[in-house]
Amino acid sequence: MKMDIDHGVRRWLDAGKYLPPEFRDFHDQKDVFKALFCDVDIQGLSWIDAHIFTVDKLLWYLAAHGYTLQRSRKRLPFCDLNNSIRQRQRAEAIAFRAAFAAREEATKPTAN
């Protein structure tokens, strides 16, 4: 069954305006889901599958029904999303450099 969506709502959805500005770019979304998978143990689902389902399906579906994602207005000491993303990126870069160095070491010619 397909939903009967108003043309204006369809344009709004297609433009991704239902997402907060910091989540409209694919690369920003990707960073959020990679950070999520570093901080939360999710079994049997890749960060890619979670990203596609959440952004392309769940949030789109909720937006088509008038619901949008927004930052909480509660005055609590929430975690900093950008900091979580930077921590994950740093850890990934360190792991990549270590793997590259190990590969370089393993492929060095040995002296006889």
Image (cartoon, helix red, strand yellow):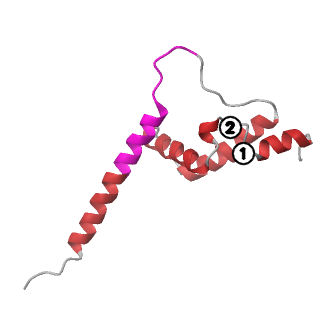
Chief SS of the magenta region: helix
The residue at which mark 2 appears reads as: 19
In the image, residue 12 sits, relative to residue 93, either above or below, namely above
Of helix, strand and loop, which one carries label 1? helix
Distance of label 2 from label 1 (alpha carbons): 12 Å
The residue at which mark 1 appears reads as: 57
Q: Residue furthest left?
A: 112
Magenta range = 74-92
In the image, taking residue 80 as reference, residue 14 lies left or right, namely right
Asked if disc 2 and disc 1 are in contact, CB closer than 8 Å, the reply is: no
Image quadrant occupied by the C terminus: bottom left
Tell me the residue at 85%/39% (across/down).
9
Q: Residue furthest top?
A: 75
Tell me the residue at 48%/23% (across/down).
78
Query: Callout 1: 10 Å neighbours few (<14), some, many (20+)?
Result: few
Tell me the residue at 77%/39% (across/down).
61
In the image, taking residue 91 as reference, residue 44 lies left or right, namely right
Q: Quadrant of residue 111?
A: bottom left
Q: Quadrant of residue 17?
A: top right
Q: Amino acid at mark 2?
A: Leu
Query: Callout 2: 10 Å neighbours few (<14), some, many (20+)?
Result: some
In the image, taking residue 107 as reference, residue 53 lies left or right, namely right
One can see residue 23 in this view: yes
